[in-house]
Structure formats: structure tokens, C-alpha cells
Amino acid sequence: MSKGHNKKRNVGLIYEQVVRQATIATTENRASDAKTYVQFVTKHFVEGSELLKEFKLFNAILETSGVSEKVADRVLELARETTRSIDVEKLHREKGTLINEANRLFGKGSLFATPVENFRALATVQSLLNEWQSPGTLSAASTAKYESQLVQFMMIRPEPQVFERMSGINETSLNMFHKRFDSVYGDKLTDTQKGFLNDLTFLDKGQITQIIFDTKERVLQLLIDHHASESNSLLKEKYEVVRKNIETMNYTDHSAPSRQLTLLQLIAELEDENE
């Protein structure tokens, strides 16, 4: 890839690397590590941040498929226009902060060495975003080449798959976060866990807080029901301990999203016991 691309500053790539590491940690029962990755994402990719603004451009481009050349050209045109609303200096600072914290939390360079399947496409998009933000980063020939590649990419019609469309997102866009989890880790996470990870990308903080609150209330009710119907005294004690721990959970702090994954898993297990 050209001088227009630095993988440590590729928002789409870093996001997928964090998602991949968080999911691996979850499936390997390394709850503490998974929590750290999820908190890292929710801290940096927040509503109003330049990082999230740029990340949404990755979605608009890479999640568009099976469209005409005219539509693909229009998607690129809109993405190019949208880059004008990004504060480049602020974005640069946010990326620097993200890189420094990633090195501190996960070891220098460790996160950025995580392989992802669609590296080439992510690198192409980031290179063009850099060029659109700061003309001259790429040569005219490279810019034309990468734009043509992405137009061709968006015109490809993928194998039929069903993905949930998110309200408020351009009709030609799907959620990259959801797609990566569904295609790579679909058999390792429950549907509700994947749905929540999907929500984290585009819903605002208030909506996420409400989802976590509702989940907490659902778990508490299930635990109360199980406690009332359980005849084994040891299990009744276990249900009560878990219930008290969840009652004290702060559903508004930075660690709440990672706890939400655990709550959703607990709901699935409790509901299975009812069947």
C-alpha cells in the first residue's frame, strides 16, 4: 500500500482488530481481557468523536454491495464530501491517543499485528480518506486507481445473506461490526450478544444505557423466578448471590457494555433452564 496508508492509524482496521481480540478473549473465557477490549472500544469510538465519524465512512463504502456503477460513484462522492466535516487535527490527536493507550494496554504493537481478512480493502479506504482530507497524500494515478477499485468492489453482488439494517443509516450501508461478528464468530456468540455489539456502533449513549438497564431488569426478574422455584438450597443461595451482585451493577459507567455481554449470556442460560 502507498505512503497514504499507515495501518496504526487506520480506523477501520484498528476497530476490527479490537473486535477480533475481544471476541477471541470471550470465546476463550478470558473475561478480564474481553472487558478491557470492549472498554477500549467504547471509550474511543464515541458519538461526537472524529474517530467514529471516520469509521462510519468505512461502513458506507465497504458495506455497500451489488449496486450499479452510478450508485457506487455516488457513495464515493458522498463519502468524499463528508470528509470535509471531519476536524483533521482533532482526528489526528484522537488517533494518537488511541495508539498510545493501545500500546500501554496490550503491549507495544501487539494489537496492530492482529490479522484481519479484509486488510486490503480497509487500507484502500483509509488511503483515500487521507487523500480526500489532505490532497496530495496520493498521486493522481493512485487516487483514480483506488477509487476505481472501490467502485468495482461495491458493484459486486455477494452471496445472499440476511443482515439487520439499522435505522438512521444510509440504505446502501450495513453495519461492518455486525457483519464481521456474524461471518467469523456467528457460532460463538448468542444472537442477542451479536445484536448488542451491533448496537454499540451506531446507537447513542442514552440508547445503549437504556438497553443495558432493560437487560439488567430482565436478568433480575429471571433470577427471582428461579430462586422462588428452586428446591435445592445451594442453588437458591447461588441465585441470591448473583442477584445481589447484579443489583449493585452501575449500568451507566464505562464497563457496563462489557458486563452487558455477560448478562445476555446469563439470560440465555436461565431461559434454557426454563425449557
Image (cartoon, rainbow, N blue to C red):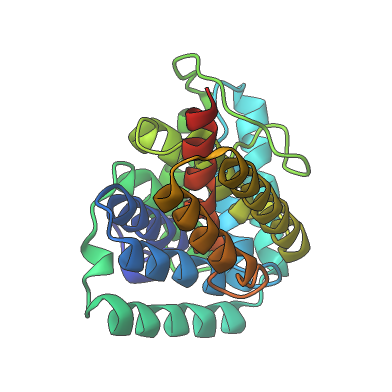
Of residue 69 and residue 188, the one placed in the foreground of this image is 188
Left or right of 252: which side holds 243?
Answer: left
Q: Give the percent coordinates (x, y) of residue 173.
A: 63, 37
Question: Residue 220: where, in percent of width, then height?
Answer: 64, 53
- Is 275 located above or below residue 7 in the figure? above
Q: For residue 100, which quarter of the picture?
A: bottom left
- Tell me residue 177's x, y (percent): 50, 46
Q: Residue at x 60, y 54 (%)?
A: 201
Can residue 6 be seen by looking at this rendering?
no
Location of residue 136 with respect to 239 vertically, above or below: below
Say if 188 sits above or below 43 in the image: above
- Residue, x 58% and y 37% (percent of image)? 229
Q: How many marks?
A: 0
Say whether residue 243 is left or right of residue 23.
Answer: right
Q: Is residue 132 above or below residue 147?
A: below
Who is closer to the viewer here, 269 or 7? 269
Residue at point 63% right, 30% down? 164
